[in-house]
Amino acid sequence: MNAPLVVSIHDVAPSTADATRTWSRHLSARGVPATLLVIPGPWEGPPLRTDADLVAWLRERVALGDEVAQHGWTHRRVPGTARWRRGVNALAARGCAEFVGVDCPEATRRVTWGRQVLRDLGFDPVGFTPPGWLASSGTTAALRDVGYRYTTSHTKVTDLHHDATIQAMVFSHRPGAASETIAAAVLAAGARRVVRARRPLRLALHPADLASPALVRATLGAIDDALDHDATPCTYRSLVGAAARRR
């Protein structure tokens, strides 16, 4: 079986619309569908529903085979979390771990708000990726209760309907960090190993990555290498559906 290749574009919002379109053009040129992780609430500017051009573009992308998935509500830490969780948020997620310390009722509110916005705009999201890939057990319970099909973490994709997991580490850059160059090399080498082992390859693209030509080259090089080795591009929705059919 060929290795599945899933590429997600993170932090899709009015403030990052240009960066999202740039990454999308790179993927489209390679025939790779994107899972577009959309922030439905207010984040670094007005919320999604105020940007008619972006919404129309997202609808076009879905019609062409991309997937729209929910990426939190505001993509910002919720005040009042425990000190150790605040530390994890600062170090691992740079302040965006919105769901790392929330209980089930609060997670349900935030998940539901965001999902309803996406539905009101004509989308049918089945997947949820928490900002920073960090979520409490209450969040996972909320996602099941709300009816989401899958969620993702750093190391796996979880089919919430069948209580099954797909083990697959996500590869992502950390732009601006002192270890940026080393991390880019690790991404390229790790992606090669995963594809050659015919395991699912997950690559995460962020708006800030585009500020570094070296990171862009590393990411696109990893995608091209995967395609050269017959990886099968798909969205998270397709990945989870295919795994469920095999089971």
Image: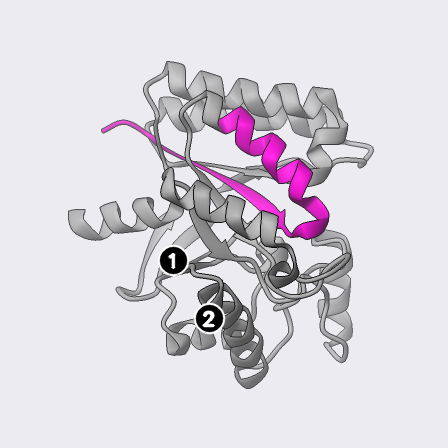
Look at mark 1 in the image and give the residue it sits on: 158
Query: Which quarter of the picture shows residue 164?
Result: bottom left
Tell me: residue 203, above or below residue 214: below
Residue 23, horizontal then vertical, whole percent = 59, 32
Say which residue label 2 marks.
Answer: 140
- The correct choice, above or below, for 195 with respect to 167 in the image is above
Left or right relative to 24: residue 151: left
Magenta segment includes 166: no
Instruction: Confirm whether residue 190 shows in the render.
Output: no
Number of numbered discs on residues: 2
Q: Residue 130 placed where, x, y %?
A: 56, 60
Magenta-highlighted residues: 1-27
Question: Is residue 234 in view?
Answer: yes
Element class at badge 2: helix
Spot occupied by residue 15 in the image (x, y as percentages of width and height): 72, 49
Label at residue 195: none
Q: Quadrant of residue 172?
A: top right
Q: Residue at x 42, y 47 (%)?
A: 67
